[in-house]
């Protein structure tokens, strides 16, 4: 049995990290368990604004060099510091996954709001 069939597609988590000579940092991470598999750091990103606000459409774009991309979204976060387990041949596939991440994050945030 393929282990990715028993895992959720997205695993969200937090980690406390530190680098030599610096303070501890509380970071959010995302693990994508399907192809292309990766772990990345999720960072708040509020710089993308539209005059009409977020109308529910998902905007995702890549910045940075190919080997170290930063994927930005209009959903209040960006994905960076990727650890690739499988590197896809097409960048469009990564963009599609990040769009799915936006939907998953919105569903998760809505669920947490209803539980409070």
Image (cartoon, rainbow, N blue to C red):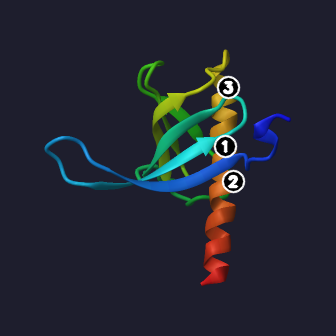
Please give the residue where the numbered disc 2 appears in the rendered image.
Answer: 103
Say whether residue 21 is left or right of residue 35.
left
> Where does residue 94 sit, x and y in percent of width and height?
64, 30
> Where does residue 98 sit, x and y in percent of width and height?
62, 40
Identify the mark nearer the N-term, 3 or 2: 3
Please give the residue where the numbered disc 1 appears in the rendered image.
Answer: 99
**Residue lying at 61% horizontally and 20% vertically, measured from the top left:** 87
Q: Are marks 3 and 1 in contact (CB under 8 Å)?
A: no
For this orientation, the residue located farthest to the right is: 1
**Residue lying at 66% horizontally and 43% vertically, measured from the top left:** 99
Q: Residues within 10 Å of mark 3 (few under 14, many from 20)?
A: few
> Where does residue 100 sit, x and y in percent of width and height?
70, 45
Looking at the rendered image, the quarter that the N terminus falls into is: top right
For this orientation, the residue located farthest to the bottom is: 116
- In this orientation, which residue lies closer to the viewer: 6 or 42? 6
Q: Are marks 1 and 2 in contact (CB under 8 Å)?
A: yes
Q: Residues within 10 Å of mark 1 (few under 14, many from 20)?
A: some
> Label for residue 36?
none
Q: Are marks 3 and 2 in contact (CB under 8 Å)?
A: no
- In this orientation, which residue lies closer to the viewer: 79 or 38? 38
Q: Secondary structure at mark 2?
A: helix
- Distance, label 3 to label 2, CA atoms, is 17 Å
> Label for residue 92?
3
């Amino acid at each position: 049995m393929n282990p990715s069939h028993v895992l959720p597609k997205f695993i969200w988590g937090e980690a406390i990290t530190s680098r030599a000579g610096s303070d501890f940092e509380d970071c959010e991470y995302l693990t994508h368990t399907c192809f292309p598999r990766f772990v990345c750091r999720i960072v708040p990103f509020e710089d993308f604004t539209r005059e009409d606000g977020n109308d529910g459409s998902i905007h995702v774009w890549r910045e940075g060099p190919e080997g170290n991309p930063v994927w930005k979204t209009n959903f209040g976060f960006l994905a960076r510091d990727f650890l690739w387990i499988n590197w896809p041949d097409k960048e469009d596939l990564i963009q599609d996954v990040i769009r799915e991440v936006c939907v998953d994050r919105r569903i998760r945030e809505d669920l947490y709001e209803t539980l409070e």
